Amino acid sequence: MNENKLELSRKRICITGGNGFLGSFVQESLKKRNASDLFIPRQTDYDLRNREAILRMLEDAKPEVIIHLAANVGGIGANMQRPAEFFYDNLMMGVQLMHEAWNAGVEKFVAIGTICAYPKFTPIPFKESDLWIGYPEETNAPYGLAKKMLLVQSQAYRQQYGFNSIFLLPVNLYGPRDNFSPKSSHVIPALIMKFYEAKYKGEKKVEVWGDGTPTREFVYAADAAEGIVLATEHYNESEPINIGSGMEISIRDLAALIADLVGYEGEIVFDTSKPNGQPRRALDVSRANALFGYKAKMNFHEGLKRTIAYYADNRDSILARG
């Protein structure tokens, strides 16, 4: 592990998207390290697509470290309906923020990429060196490519300016506080909501998008947050780093597992008219372990149980939000 540890307890840290799902866990991980000088910009106060808002945020926060989590993101359906929005919003937020952070003399910039940046047919397990061997899966390529440009920018700014920026690639997240909205949720919260509500209403079948054959890797949000903070402390290169759990499960098996944990006993029907998305996803996470000691800790079954319990405990407010 790199011995040049960044003492986060002594730094002014700005976390964009810090009040979001992953951001809430990153805050907790930082606070465990006694990092208390945290600036969490709200979207209503700082529209990071706008350069003037970015400059105002940097003036207000005066950050030494920026962890850029903010993103406009959703599942396959949302990506298919709003590809231009996902491309523009994520590109404009990230590129302008990194540029102005360098211009303002920020000490370290942590860019959060996405698993969607990988080519559609990346060999399993995904290695960081394979990021450029093909085009991303079409349904989420605009989002994935917008985030991938932060890697290009990070490496270019380090080469020309010596700017200390890093680029991390978290796999699909899940856990308590996730987004359960049917309009924009990812697969685990979407399935939890479907099966829980089907059991509650006594429905005899639940439809799942695709044919069930694609595989996915998932990492508990608290584990991903710990990986991000470890990298912020110890990693100082612009080569991309995977943040995951090293597991792989098919959507068919995932649906069956969630149905079982929820207690739903009806039929699971796969809607093959809907897209599958990327055929397989599973990461090689050895670089993160070797370079800054990262390893996911949460057992997948236990993590699912905690996420289901969160939904059950907050069901009324989640349904009210829609």
Image (spheres, helix red, strand yellow):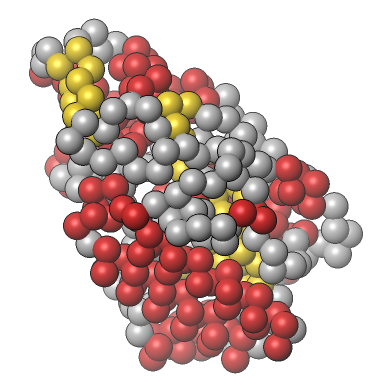
Residue 228: quadrant of the picture: bottom right
Q: Which residue is drawn at the image coordinates 51% and 36% (left, top)?
A: 217
Task: Name the quarter where the C terminus is drawn.
Answer: top left
Q: Which residue is drawn at the image coordinates 29% and 11% (left, top)?
A: 263
In front of the other: 239 or 313:
239
Q: Which residue is drawn at the image coordinates 31% and 17% (left, top)?
A: 259
Whole-percent x and y of residue 148?
50, 66
* Residue 25 showing in the rendered view: no
Q: Residue furthest top?
A: 265
Whole-percent x and y of residue 320?
15, 42
In front of the other: 157 or 97:
157
Q: Is residue 154 left or right of residue 320?
A: right
Q: How many marks?
A: 0
Q: Which residue is drawn at the image coordinates 77% and 59% (left, top)?
A: 234
* Vertical placement of residue 297 versus 160, above or below: above
Q: Is residue 265 left or right of residue 188?
A: left
Residue 260: quadrant of the picture: top left
Whole-percent x and y of residue 2?
85, 58
Q: Is residue 234 left or right of residue 97?
A: right
Residue 289: quadrant of the picture: top right
In front of the other: 124 or 173:
124
Whole-percent x and y of residue 112?
54, 61
Q: Is residue 56 left or right of residue 63?
A: left
* Residue 154 showing in the rendered view: yes
